[in-house]
Amino acid sequence: MRVGIFALSGPFERQPFEAGLQLLREAGFAPELAPGVFERQGYLAGDDRVRVDGLEALLDDPDLSLLMAARGGYGIHRVLPRIPHRRMKGRCVAGFSDVTALHCARFAADGAWGLHCAVVTQLHRLSEPALAATLAALRHPEAGCRLVGSPGFGPAVEGTVVGGNLALLGHLVGTPHLRWPPDPILLLEDVSEAPYRLDRMLTHLELTGLPDRVRGVAVGRFEGCRGPADGPEGHAVVAERLERWNVPVVFDLPVGHGPDNHPVPVGRKGRLEPGSGRLEVLPC
């Protein structure tokens, strides 16, 4: 199975990238690299033109239906107005972190769904169960998923699973690249953010009136989100803020920047069960 590898975000070290490519090949995938994928311009994988041109080159092949990000970082926000959504229709985009912006923009443009999962450079760091689940999801993106975290509060709800990285979502508010469905189940994760910054981001979403619109919140991992020794950790802040939203919540799902990053289809219908700590996304 062929998979196109694009780099719309940050530059990356060759060793973890090659390790990820090797895992893909061993699993039966044939990676095809976008032109300019190894470019580097400061904190970007080449200038904006190079990064978008690389994606466009992959889209020239009408039979290449699976596209996967080389890494996250930063950079997709800069090129969102140049993303060729019509040419991407019918293709599955796989990735997370900075790729949250692309998932959201595609959903806002035409309701396209994607796969919130590891990028190429993260593959070699995944746990065995997470790697197996990711490779299975790449082979069959149309399949659903069933993840178990920690029980939260509220009744079971159904809706459309959207979201991803909290910081990326916050920076899309007020732009045409973020459109909430009428029944959102919000997926959230983040990494290396101070607890007060998580508080600020969630408060920002709260001030937009989002708690009155969401059906529920599926909370993944907040890796390395620690503050001073005498202060609260990130997960405690997230729990405190979400309790104010008065919506069903599940905590500690295996989704995020750590080794236990399991794939979740976003932009698709799902069910959140706080009593059992489950998130299920239906096949399409």
Image (spheres, helix red, strand yellow):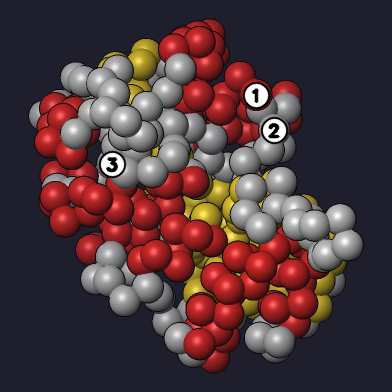
Q: Is residue 253 visible?
A: no
Residue bearing the label numbered 2: 259
Give me the C-alpha separation between circle 3 and circle 1: 26 Å
Q: Which picture quadrant has residue 179?
A: bottom left
Horizontal and vertical percent position of residue 68: 38, 32
Q: Are marks 2 and 3 in contact (CB under 8 Å)?
A: no
Residue bearing the label numbered 3: 91
The residue that appears at 44% across and 38% down in the rendered structure is 72
Q: Closer to us: mark 2 or mark 3?
A: 2
89 lies above or below 174: above
Binning the other alpha carbons within 10 Å of mark 1 as few (below 14), some (14 to 19) or many (20 upward) gives some
Residue bearing the label numbered 1: 125
Give me the C-alpha separation between circle 2 and circle 3: 26 Å
Secondary structure, mark 1, is helix
* Residue 170, numbered label: none
The residue that appears at 57% across and 24% down in the rendered structure is 123
214 lies above or below 119: below
Q: Closer to us: mark 3 or mark 1?
A: 1
Binning the other alpha carbons within 10 Å of mark 3 as few (below 14), some (14 to 19) or many (20 upward) gives some
Q: How many marks?
A: 3
Farthest residue toward the right? Answer: 230
Q: Are marks 1 and 2 in contact (CB under 8 Å)?
A: yes
User: Who is closer to the viewer here, 228 or 191?
Assistant: 228
Q: Amino acid at mark 1?
A: Arg
**With 281 as the anchor, is 12 left or right in this view?**
left
**With 236 as the anchor, is 279 left or right in this view?**
left
Q: Are marks 3 and 1 in contact (CB under 8 Å)?
A: no
Q: Amino acid at mark 2?
A: Pro
Q: Is residue 101 visible?
A: yes
Q: Amino acid at mark 3?
A: Arg
